[in-house]
Image: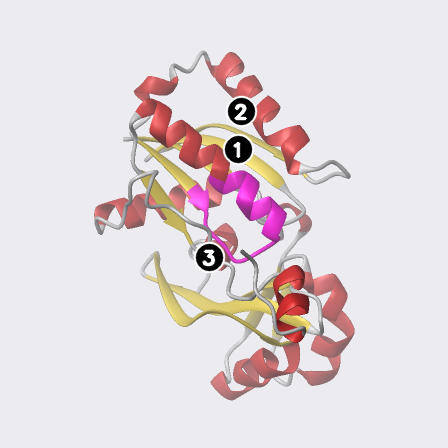
Amino acid sequence: MKILAFDSSGLVASVAVLEEERMIAEYTVNYKKTHSQTLLPMLDEVVKMTELDLHEIDAIAVAAGPGSFTGLRIGSATAKGLGLALDKPLVPVPTLEGLAFNLCGCPDVICPMMDARRKQVYTGLYTFVDGKMQVLKEQTACPVEEILEECNARGRKVVFLGDGVPVCRSIIEETVRVPYAFAPAHMSRQRAGAVGMRAFDYIRENKTETAAEHAPVYLRKSQAERELLAKGKTLE
């Protein structure tokens, strides 16, 4: 089983090719360029460096959301286009699960956070039991104080990661009353390799879809939609 994986849900752009026992390649960039500039050239470089025939892949995994509206659309369009062209199934991996999978095997409560603006974060709670991911709280958009109080209520050590952590660090330090830690830099942002590894679990559970069926999961309306709703209008 060979998977091509993408994550462009946040500030990071990442492409990976994986087999179940081996990550063949991963190209991850966290720099000031738009994903429309980086994702396809990164894929092209991975294909060239690994001499990959894209027809050999069995499925395409993609961070399905939530996250940046633009980033999710770019990742979704890339995955859908390849899925249609290659006639391959898509594996939509919830963004926060992919992010938490960076800490695969960690027995503590894992709390990934993405900055959702408007004093909110995209977040969820996860842990690993006997090497398998357990979802303690499904991904959601909420005020940061809400998820921190839930962490306190669980009474277990928490590991925080994601681009929401620097934004919310002072609130975390003031609010959290249980032992906690912050993931190191190489494990604290989105990685396509983690999305791909989580996708293997989804494939074993037959949780795939066709390219035509795939759509990003936003959890919240875009700013443009919120502004139109405030005026009593909707997007056409």
Q: Amino acid at mark 1?
A: Val
In magenta segment, residue 69: yes
- Coordinates of residue 158 in the picture (x, y in percent): 56, 72
> Label for residue 15?
1
The correct choice, above or below, for 194 with respect to 4 in the image is: below
Determine whether the residue tagged by mark 1 lies in a helix, strand or loop.
strand
Q: Answer whether residue 5 is visible to the viewer in this image.
A: yes
Q: Are marks 2 and 1 in contact (CB under 8 Å)?
A: yes
Determine whether the residue tagged by mark 3 lies in a helix, strand or loop.
loop
> Label for residue 217?
3
In magenta segment, residue 197: no
> What residue is shown at x 44% (from left), y 35% (from top)?
79
Residue 90, quarter of picture: top left
Residue carrying label 2: 43
Say which label, 1 or 3, has the lower sequence index: 1
- Coordinates of residue 52 in the picture (x, y in percent): 42, 15
> Label for residue 168?
none
- Coordinates of residue 1 in the picture (x, y in percent): 27, 31
Please indicate whether residue 216 sits to the left or right of residue 10 in the image: left
The correct choice, above or below, for 229 with respect to 28 in the image is: below
Residues rendered magenta in the picture: 62-76
